[in-house]
Image (spheres, grey):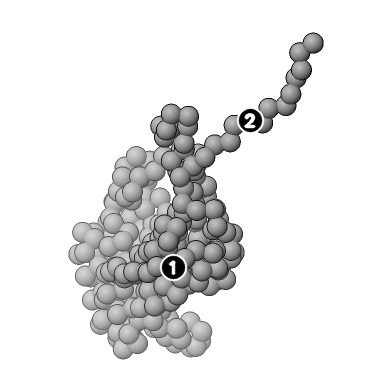
């Protein structure tokens, strides 16, 4: 009579583990400052049990930070988009001592958001009986995506495009000067190659301190540019809608530079 014994299934072995972490609704001031991000990433690495060897962080214009923490087990990296309050974090380790959950707890606390999500958990370099196996497919859901607003606009055959920009901490004397606000509308239209119709209308709503400041309207081909400049916060709030394509980032970057803003948030709707 044959004897049936339980045989354990084979256990895969990998050379490393790769985690993809998505951070949404982050504090934009934190993720736009390398002096703040670097100690946060170092704390995340240390709390996860990694052995930190060094780090390098760099600021991009007009805003955003990229950085890497080198650990004995491999690395942690980050790139941020303050305009979308988003940070992309990658962690890779070739050891078994890293606790990625503890690293994510640090990111949640320091970035001021609960929306820190483990979007990918990959085994890298799977070892088989005859050496390294060839990867057949990645283990995260693939999303068809493009990397430019123009391409998305064309593929979707969009009827129009709306860009909403909030520029923070503008130079007070600039947003309080009527002629400067009018000149901004003219130069913005030139920047995005949009024909103007009529003169820029600027009105000062100064009766209520909460909304005190200039508002502007400029008709353009197929629609308009509108905005409000809040004296209380020194923020500029701009909307551009048109059925003719323009680059949303050009609107945001130009507005920030024109009014000397510290940073901006951006929302685009097709």
Position of residue 175 in the picture relative to residue 50 (left or right):
left
Mark 1 falls on what kind of element?
A: strand
Instruction: Identify the secondary structure beneath mark 2.
Output: loop
Q: Nearer the viewer, residue 6 or 64?
A: 6
Q: Crowding at label 1, few (<14), some or many (≥20) Cα neighbours within 10 Å?
A: some
Relative height, residue 262 to residue 18 (above, below): below
Is 232 placed above or below 71 here?
below
Location of residue 217 with respect to 249 vertically, above or below: below
Q: Is 157 in front, or is 201?
A: 157
Q: Residue at x 32, y 50 (%)?
A: 148
Which residue is found at the position 27% from the left and 62% from the top? 250
**Residue 45: percent from left, percent from top:** 49, 66
Q: Residue furthest top?
A: 1
Horizontal side of 36 relative to 248 (left or right) equals right
Q: Nearer the viewer, residue 113 or 103?
A: 103
Which of the numbered marks, if any, corresponds to residue 9? Answer: 2
Circle 2 crowding by C-alpha within 10 Å: few under 14, some 14–19, many from 20: few
Q: Position of residue 270 (x, y in %)?
A: 40, 50
Q: Residue at x 30, y 84 (%)?
A: 174
Taking the image as shown, residue 167 lies to the left or right of residue 5, namely left
Q: Position of residue 108 (x, y in %)?
A: 56, 67
Residue bearing mark 1: 52
> What separation in Å lies between label 2 and label 1 (alpha carbons)?
36 Å
Q: Earlier in the sequence, mark 2 or mark 1?
A: 2
């Amino acid at each position: 009579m044959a004897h049936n014994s339980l045989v354990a299934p084979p256990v895969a072995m990998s050379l490393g583990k790769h985690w993809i972490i998505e951070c949404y609704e982050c504090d934009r001031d934190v993720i736009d400052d390398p002096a703040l991000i670097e100690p946060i990433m170092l704390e995340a690495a240390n709390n996860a049990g990694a052995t930190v060897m060094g780090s390098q962080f760099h600021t991009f214009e007009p805003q955003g930070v990229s950085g890497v923490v080198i650990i004995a087990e491999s690395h942690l990296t980050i790139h941020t988009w303050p305009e979308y309050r988003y940070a992309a974090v990658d962690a890779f380790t070739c050891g078994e001592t890293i606790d990625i959950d503890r690293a994510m707890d640090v990111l949640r606390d320091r970035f001021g958001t609960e929306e820190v999500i483990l979007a990918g958990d990959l085994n890298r370099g799977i070892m088989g009986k005859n050496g390294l196996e060839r990867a057949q497919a990645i283990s995260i859901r693939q999303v068809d995506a493009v990397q430019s607003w123009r391409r998305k606009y064309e593929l979707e055959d969009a009827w129009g495009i709306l860009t909403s920009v909030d520029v923070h901490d503008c130079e007070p004397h600039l947003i309080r000067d009527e002629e400067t606000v009018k000149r901004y509308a003219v130069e913005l239209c030139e920047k995005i190659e949009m024909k103007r119709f009529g003169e820029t209308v600027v009105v000062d709503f100064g009766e209520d301190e909460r909304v005190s400041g200039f508002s502007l309207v400029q008709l353009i081909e197929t629609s308009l540019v509108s905005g409000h400049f809040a004296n209380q916060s020194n923020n500029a709030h701009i909307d551009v809608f048109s059925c003719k394509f323009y680059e949303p980032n050009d609107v945001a970057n130009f507005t920030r530079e024109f009014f000397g803003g510290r940073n901006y948030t951006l929302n685009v709707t097709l």
